[in-house]
Image: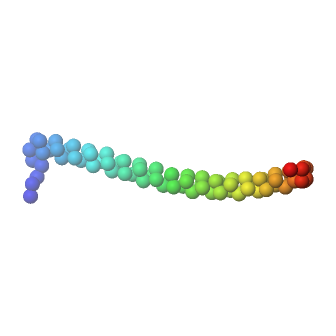
Amino acid sequence: MSTFSTYDEDEQYKIALQQFQTLQTSVVDLRRAVILLRGNTLIALQRYRQTKAQLKKCEAELTHMHRVLHGDEE
């Protein structure tokens, strides 16, 4: 079994440990970002669906009002 006993090995261990800690922090931050983005995506999708439904209703009402106001002129 090898131990990190020499100076070079100690330095390599310190560098590897620092890289590990940096990656660990990145993973935690990215997981948080994914959770937030997932939540934001769900909210945005819900708003999109509601807005699309409202647009459809308004377009239908506009078409109806156009017919009421203009009859069969076209």
Q: Position of residue 39 (x, y in %)?
A: 54, 55
In depth, the one of 24 and 53 nearer the eye is 53
Is 67 in front, or is 16?
Answer: 67
Left or right: 11 in relation to 41: left
Q: Is residue 53 left or right of residue 6?
A: right
Q: Identify the residue shown where x is 64% and y is 53%.
A: 48
Give the residue drawn at x 51%, y 55%: 38
In percent of width and height, residue 72 lies at 89, 53
Q: Residue 67 location in percent, x, y?
A: 87, 53
Count of numbered tags: 0
The residue drawn where x is 21% and y is 43% is 15
From the viewer's perspective, is 50 left or right of 1? right
Left-right relation of 13 to 47: left
Quarter holding the N terminus is bottom left
> Residue 60: x and y, percent?
79, 56
Q: Specify the color scheme.
A: rainbow
